[in-house]
């Protein structure tokens, strides 16, 4: 195998002009790489693209190593090289942007000294299975996008403490995402990974605050320290069975949709949702009873599915619309009462049990209440305002009287 290696020692007499540019330096030949390799700091951006002409091995593959440069005050872009199998910057510690794209044969990526990158974009790296970012790995980054790669793990970026944007999608061999991050300043999106394996585990053991978080196609989601989500926390099409966030107290919006294996949700410390509160089409979720401290929903409450019990004992206010539709045997009496009194539910109201096709708020056109509200055997809707309301028989009457008084 032939490797193209640029030795910094051989070019120690680099002039200052070789180490800076106001635009982008494109490496297309050996002489271009030679000039870059003689710099410890490069001011400007570097692009290595389609027309790279370096020696090839017997299979026509290329390898590129640039050994001295420690800092790039700009972007490093490597794209559209069908024959590049190895890429190495062994001394590089800091770069503003690192973009690798459409490198279909890249199998070795080595940046063992890299710790700081503002923006990292890895796309269409089908043959790349591992990241080599050294023992510490990247600890500081603003934005990370990894999509359509062959990665089986994210070792090399797991020591991140804070990140603005974190988007990991369509990496079919990825089985685990574990991150030590404590704060996500903008958004986290995890979607369509681990299609070929047994299940994706996502774990953020130290994450306390986030602005927006979306999880799709995950088998395990662990958020033990999460306390606040400013905007939306959404779970769509996952196959996890249980979800708990024991320290979450507030969320801008909370959504569970199409999680076909979900049987239990537990958010015991959650007191307020400052946006939409939606639980829809989670076919194995028979009880919604894991929100014992929830008091205020400033947006809409939108539940639909085949559940038979809803328990919101601390609820005092729903400012938006209220839609509850289920195919299960469900008693709407308690929610009817708090809607009629106008004290708790203030928006358009729908509550209906025993529906053949329960719908979300978007599919509801009128304010209605139907279902088995007169049945002693109907499932319960539990609600508390100063005193508990317990559905069924004389307890129902007593509970309603306490509410009226």
Image (spheres, rainbow, N blue to C red):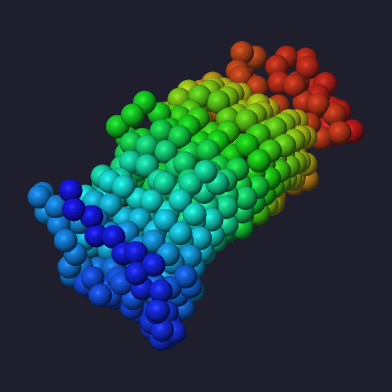
| Numbered marks: total | 0
| Residue nearest the observer in this picture, 98 or 329 | 98
| Residue 367 appears in the figure | no
| Residue nearest the observer in this picture, 372 or 4 | 4
Q: Quadrant of residue 60?
A: bottom left
Measuring 34% from the left and 69% from the top, which residue is drawn there? Answer: 10
Residue 259 spot, x, y in % from top left: 46, 32
Does residue 36 appear to the left or right of 3 in the view shown?
right
Residue 190 spot, x, y in % from top left: 45, 45
Measuring 40% from the left and 29% from the top, which residue is drawn there? Answer: 199
Residue 213 spot, x, y in % from top left: 55, 48
Question: Which residue is farthest right?
Answer: 405
Q: Quadrant of residue 53?
A: bottom left
Measuring 59% from the left and 39% from the top, which residue is drawn there? Answer: 204
Q: Quadrant of the C terminus?
A: top right
Measuring 83% from the left and 32% from the top, which residue is drawn there? Answer: 403
Residue 302 spot, x, y in % from top left: 56, 42
| Residue 221 appears in the figure | yes
86 lies above or below 40 = above
Q: Quadrant of residue 123?
A: bottom left
């Amino acid at each position: 195998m032939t490797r193209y290696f640029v030795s910094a020692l051989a070019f120690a007499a680099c002039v200052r002009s070789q180490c800076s540019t106001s635009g982008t330096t494109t490496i297309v030949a050996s002489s271009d790489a030679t000039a870059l390799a003689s710099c410890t700091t490069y001011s400007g951006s570097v692009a290595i693209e389609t027309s790279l002409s370096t020696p090839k091995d017997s299979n026509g593959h290329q390898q590129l190593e640039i050994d001295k440069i420690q800092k790039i005050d700009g972007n490093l872009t490597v794209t559209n090289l069908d024959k590049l199998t190895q890429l190495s910057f062994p001394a590089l510690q800091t770069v503003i942007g690192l973009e690798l794209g459409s490198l279909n044969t890249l199998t070795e990526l080595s940046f063992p000294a890299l710790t700081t990158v503002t923006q990292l974009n890895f796309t269409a790296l089908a043959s790349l299975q591992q990241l080599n970012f050294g023992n510490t790995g990247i600890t500081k980054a603003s934005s990370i996008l990894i999509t359509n790669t062959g990665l089986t793990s994210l070792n090399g970026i797991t020591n991140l403490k804070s990140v603005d944007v974190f988007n990991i999608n369509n990496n079919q061999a990825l089985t685990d995402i574990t991150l030590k991050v404590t704060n996500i300043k903008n958004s986290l999106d995890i979607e369509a990974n681990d299609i070929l394996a047994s299940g994706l585990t996502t774990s953020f053991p130290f994450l306390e605050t986030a602005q927006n978080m979306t999880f799709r196609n995950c088998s395990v989601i662990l958020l033990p320290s999460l306390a606040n989500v400013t905007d939306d926390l959404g779970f769509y099409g996952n196959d996890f069975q249980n979800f708990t966030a024991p320290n979450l107290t507030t969320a801008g919006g909370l959504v569970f949709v199409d999680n076909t294996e979900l049987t239990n949700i537990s958010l015991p410390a959650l007191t307020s949702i400052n946006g939409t509160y939606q639980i829809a089409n989670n076919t194995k979720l028979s009880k919604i009873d894991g929100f014992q401290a929830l008091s205020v929903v400033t947006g809409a409450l939108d539940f639909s599915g085949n559940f038979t019990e809803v328990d919101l004992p601390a609820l005092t206010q729903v400012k938006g619309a209220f839609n509850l539709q289920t195919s299960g045997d469900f008693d709407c009496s308690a929610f009817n009462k708090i809607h009629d009194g106008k004290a708790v539910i203030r928006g358009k109201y729908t509550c209906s049990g025993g529906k053949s096709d329960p719908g979300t708020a978007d599919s509801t056109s009128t304010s209605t209440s139907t279902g088995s509200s007169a049945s002693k055997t109907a499932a319960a809707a539990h609600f508390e305002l100063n005193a508990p309301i317990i559905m069924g028989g004389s307890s129902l009457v007593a509970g309603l009287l306490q509410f009226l008084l």
